[in-house]
Image (cartoon, rainbow, N blue to C red):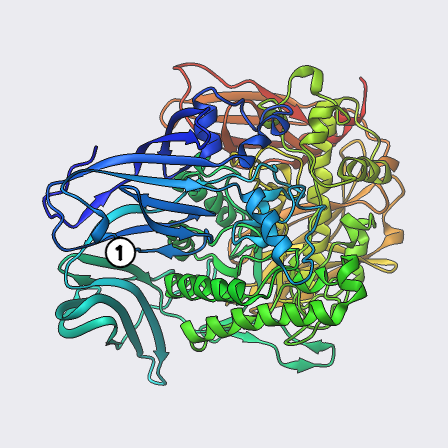
Amino acid sequence: MTSLPKNGFNIDLSGSWQLASVDGEIRTTIILPGDVHTALHRAGLIPDPYFGRNEEKVQWVAEREWAVERSFTLPEVEGDWYLDIDYLDTVASVHVNGFLALEADNSFRRHRPDISSMLKSGDNSIRIVFASSIAVAAARQKQQPFYIPYSTGNSPIPDGNMLRKPQCHFGWDWNIAIAPLGLYGTIALKKLETARIEHVVTRQTHNNDGSVDLKVTATLFSKGPDIAQVYFELDGERVRLDVGVNGETHVNHLFHIDNPRLWWPSGSGEQALYRLSVELPTDEVTKQIGLRTIELITTPDASGSRFAFKVNGREIFCRGANWIPADALFSLSSPEKTEDLLQSAKAANMNMIRVWGGGFYEQDHFYDLCDRLGLMVWQDFMFACNLYPSTEDFLDNVTIEVDYQVRRLSSHASIVLWCGDNELVGALTWFEESRKDRDRYLVSYDRLNRTIEQAVKKALPGALWWPSSPASGYLDFGDAWHADGSGDMHYWSVWHENKSFDNYRSVRPRFCSEFGFQSYTSLPVIRTYAEEKDMNVASPVMELHQKNAGGNERIAGTMFRYFRFPKDFPNFVYLSQIQQGLAIKTAVEYWRSLKPHCMGTIYWQLNDTWPVASWSSLDYGGRWKAMHYLVKRFFQPVAVAAIPDGKTIRFSLVNDTLAEVSVDLAVSILTVKGERRHLKDVQAVCSPDAAVTATSVDVSDIPEGTLLAWHFTASNGTGGEGHYVNGTYKALELEPAGLAVTHEYIEENGSVDINVTARGLALFVMIETETDGKYSDNAFDLAAGESRRITFTLARPLDRGALPEFRFYDLYSCQSAD
């Protein structure tokens, strides 16, 4: 039971509820916000869905109907009361004291039904009944005027495209297929006193004199005519307005800021934020406001048309990754886990995150954090890789969804683009039905896309809108997977078409918003779902935790192409991560060297939703894979890369900063014994926001069986190193690296200092432990006699005096049975 708070206006109904299958066979408790699968697992009624092959054992949960119920106490019921509910997943009916209060079928909408007439003094009950998404989706498919195809490769649970629910809940080529259900947001009973705040939306005008006018529009709702006291406050400047309200009322106030502190993306300036609040006596909305201008440059040029973001008048090269939900099951996620993932993105020199269209519009804390971290957000609407209905009821539902989400999110400085969908144009070519009758399905798609666009522009006039990703331009329904002259590109030929890494250099994208290469999740994570007997890439458990058809074969085939085959399963996992990093490094370094022709590389994908083989650079749980350490290096604002160009290797120098930089570059030959033979020293200069060729080396200057190596220091204080193999790693006759390791536990901050020394050539030295934490560096090279000091920061303190057990990998030992 929850008693009425003293102020009488708000009863938080989150917490413990009773959960039962509607047939009455299963009963337990559930914590809301939360999901049904996690509640059943915690009660011991189903096994851990993520372990072994348990995915197959828990799929029945989504086939049943479930109900959650609780009671609450109201001393008195005078006045107007409403429920406040969001993230209700998905087809659900809400009953108060047996009366139907709400029928919902869109997990991306907020609901505020009036329940005044349903309440009584004393004990009250609220019950939410969740229909089976699988059953409802199948029924709705049958009701369509023509069949609406969905991607069976991504969605083994059928017809998810019928519902406004995260599409990846029905499975994906990286996600578990269990169609979870529950309530993941607000669940509260509120009293309407005079008025409530429905939305707060801001618009900025940046004036020629440098000042900014911030127009704040508060949408209020009242049941009848009344007078409301509204307070607007921006960083201490507070204004009271007494306004007449009746039904939905818009109240405006203009703040003038003479000397604004501007918000910049990470690496380009300060993330200045202002606190804005709109208050009624019984309601308040607060937002953090970043003052900035944003433009999308799509001007025609000799190659087609540009695709570049301009913030505060300056073009920004976008370095980032695609975001998918932080967990397949909501109850296993948390704001702290989300923050850890986004902090890891910033730590790897990213300045953009693409919120991909098959998951959620994320909760407020996600965007608040992106504001603070300076991570620009490319925001997809939640449509991905399927075709969708265009019936009137479906489009009306979408209109309300888009209006709510845009009004909720539009004041975030971090959100720089609103994109209609993910890969729906391409999906027109994926299905037999749409290939045979393209006109019908194209018109249907256009109706949906126009509905989204019109709703966006009505809710947020002047919003930056992009119709689809990938897209070559407005009303351009061409193949943006292979056409690289205009717009944004998804380039998947290396992974899905099994082409070599150097194929990334065959295209010149204007902005690549998806490209990726898979690896296995790290061994400590594999051990959370697999037993020792399953430690084989062909075991049923490992195959179930690989959701992309042919993925395991592609990983192994790529190893045969570039490496000698690893000696055992742990080294197979290690090498898969090294080659993943090399694939993405190849693409990013080349495309960055094309700047300003190319102005963005957003790889697939940042994170995982559960422990699985995937394209992510962060393991499920937030550990950095080998690739993420490489990302930190090749995403440096000032970076040097070796790029083959015919019979020469050119050294590309990229500068994403506002200042000119000079670089001291030392190039050498590295033998398999680990000896460095000096080749040349170069001093190069790069102007702000540019890319130049610092120097070149003839391929003939690289003796057979050796590597080209370099290190650099830049005038802005950064530096780096790298190597280039003219051929394949398997052709190198590597010798033992002779790694020697010492480590020391630092009591003061709970970290471990690890000193690694090599007697010979050590390529891609990787440190690993079962203990959770992060390394200051990893997957690094050492030549003979060189040492590297690494700090391992533990996620949680160990017992006093205890040390983690570390494992060490390098390329020679990975491939040698010695």
**Above or below: residue 736 compared with residue 2:** above
Residue beneath label 1, please? 114
Point 48% across, 40% down: residue: 181
**Nearer to us in this view, 197 or 355:** 197
Residue that extends furthest to the bottom in the rendered view of this protein? 208
Name which quarter of the figure residue 655 lies in.
Answer: bottom right
The answer to whether 31 is drawn above or below residue 241 in the figure is above
Q: Nearer the viewer, residue 679 or 508?
A: 508
Residue sitting at 30 percent across and 42 percent down?
A: 98
Residue plotted at (24% across, 47% down): 189
Quarter of the image for the C terminus: give it. Answer: top right
The answer to whether one can see residue 719 in this image is no
Classify residue 140 as left or right of residue 118. Answer: right
Q: Residues within 10 Å of mark 1 (few under 14, many from 20)?
A: some
Q: Where's residue 641, x and y in %?
A: 69, 54
Q: Residue at x 59, y 27 (%)?
A: 525
Nearer to the camera, 333 or 40: 40
- Quarter holding the N terminus? top left
Give x and y (percent) for residue 286: 26, 58
Label 1 SS: loop
- Three-letter residue code for mark 1: Asp
Where 164 sits versus 526, above or below? below
